[in-house]
Image: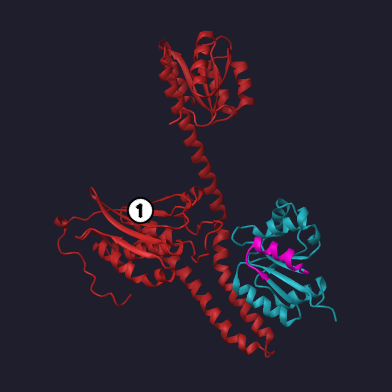
Amino acid sequence: MTAHQRVLIIDDDLDFRVSMRSLLESSGYEVIEADSGAEGLKKVVENKPDLIFLDIMMENDTEGYSVSYSLRNREEYSDYRDIPIFMISSIEESPDERFAMADEAGLIQPDYYLTKPLDIPRLLELLKSAVPP
Amino acid sequence: MNEAPTVEPIVVIDDDYAMRFSCRKILLKAGYIVEDFEDGASGLEAIAALKPSLVLVDLKMPGMSGMEVIARLHEIDSRIICIVITGYATIDTAVEAMKSGAYDFLPKPFSPDELRIIVKRGLERRRLAMLAHRHELERELFRRRFVTFVSHQLQSPLVAVHQYLDVLKHLGDAPGAAAKREEWLERCLRRTEELQTLIRDWLTLSRIERDFLSLHRVPLDVCEIVRHVIQGVELLASGDEIRMEARLPEDPCIVTGDRECVTVLLENLVTNAIKYNRPGGSVTVSVERLNSELAIAVEDTGCGIPEESQPFLFEEFFRVKQDGARKTSGNGLGLAISKRIVSEMGGTIGVRSQPGAGATFTVLLPEYHQREATGTYEQDEDHSDR
């Protein structure tokens, strides 16, 4: 068997990270955490995760979008451009709004867009299709 | 003070060569960039490209009149300050010009000083107008974001609790789940408390506005409440090695209000001063008499508050975002509550701060004089229930 797939959780809510870590570990993933966008970018380079959970609204309203923009567009992160990102928000936004935000941030629509609280069976399905454990 | 701290472009439009020449000379010497034109049409053309801060325009010119220039000028940019140059005979027209948007008028003949002063005043007016405009824009942005903010604040604890319970359910009797259960339930409780505090604060806010204070208005000694509040935060302060100091007059300083509200007000200010301080710093609370008012100042030695955040500090849910500051808890309602309490008591609250050099919150409250009193002020009889 190969090594575990590695998931980086970028979220400023400690409790969200704690529960997600347990869920993901129990499903066979390795978990890394970051509590801010800047910390998250650092951990991407240090740990080269296979998948990223990215909270949109952290210290700044659209911090998550800045992070995904950096990962997708900036030269220094070109090695990490293809890592799938789950954009996560606690507020349901309409697809239009979402598109506008992503567009404003210079992104194409994020691959995955999830609303908290995450639906566990659906999340595990998505994970399996994005990065099989 | 430097007369022209930043280089501000000024346009002079006058058909009189001597007038243009002297205006130009005086203003160049004062440090401004000056362009001059002999008629309205060429002046306006240049204004559209130059976007000057201020325009001096003669009213009586052949071709396009000064009045027409003013009207067109404000179509180009309403923030350009326009000063009308006019002979005594046309003061009526100058008044007319001011009605249509000119900022001021300068009667001919004028001295270099008069010109410099009116220009400086006009530019100051523009600076203030632009500052107000910027604040208004930021405030509008904040208002538009308000619903998002509130939903996020209310959602976060709920989501955290939901996620814990859902994951616990999912894990079931898996190995290790039992150990987590205890710890997670504890965390869930803490998050529900956070939500309760948020809702309670929000209710306090609207209650103060409605009727709370008018119901419990009694004479109170501010100094005694200050001592009491400082006593109450001892543990919090010593945890961060913050030194607390009180500078209070010896005799009572009386205001009228609700004891609980005044305590909440001072507690908010003092706990903020501790939370946003640096370890090993200090907090000084002073009460002073200023004419018929009492000035209560709470001074800290923390990282300060950026100037651009200061106008919003007292808005609901506003929290200062600052790199390098310690992460602190809080729901962004404390200062909003404080401000409402102070306004209900007929006072004002303000802040002075230099980034990096701490902040001082000052509350001014009307002092209540004993001779107006029918009885004595309310003594604090019981400290133990706090």
Q: Say whether residue A44 is magenta.
A: yes
Instruction: Locate residue B334: give its quadrant.
Output: bottom left
Location of the N terminus of chain B by quadrant is: top left
> Which residue appears at 73% of the width and 56% of the height?
A70
Q: Which of B369 and B114 is in front in this view?
A: B114
Please name the predominant secondary structure of the magenta segment in the image: helix
Q: Which residue lies furthest to the front in this view?
A: B280
Judge the density around disc 1: few (<14), some (14-19), many (≥20) Cα neighbours within 10 Å: many
Q: Colour of chain B?
A: red
Q: Position of residue A126 (x, y in %)?
A: 78, 72
Q: Position of residue A131 (x, y in %)?
A: 81, 72
Q: In this view, does B288 lie to the left or right of A51?
A: left
The C terminus of chain B lies in quadrant: bottom left
Q: Which of B116 and A109 is in front in this view?
A: B116
B349 falls in the magenta region: no
Q: Colour of chain A?
A: cyan
Left or right of B263 on screen, residue B190: right
Image side of residue B148 versus residue B203, left or right: right
Residue picked out by circle 1: B362
Q: In this view, does B343 lie above or below B116?
A: below
Provide residue A73's location: percent of width, then percent of height: 77, 54
Q: Which chain carries label 1?
A: B
Q: Which contiguous range is marked in magenta?
A: A33-50
Q: Which colour scheme is used?
A: by chain
Q: Quadrant of residue A81?
A: bottom right
Considering the numbered disc 1 on the image, is that residue within a helix, a strand or a loop? Answer: strand
Q: Residue at left 65%, top 60%?
A: A38
Please say whether residue B16 is visible from this viewpoint: no
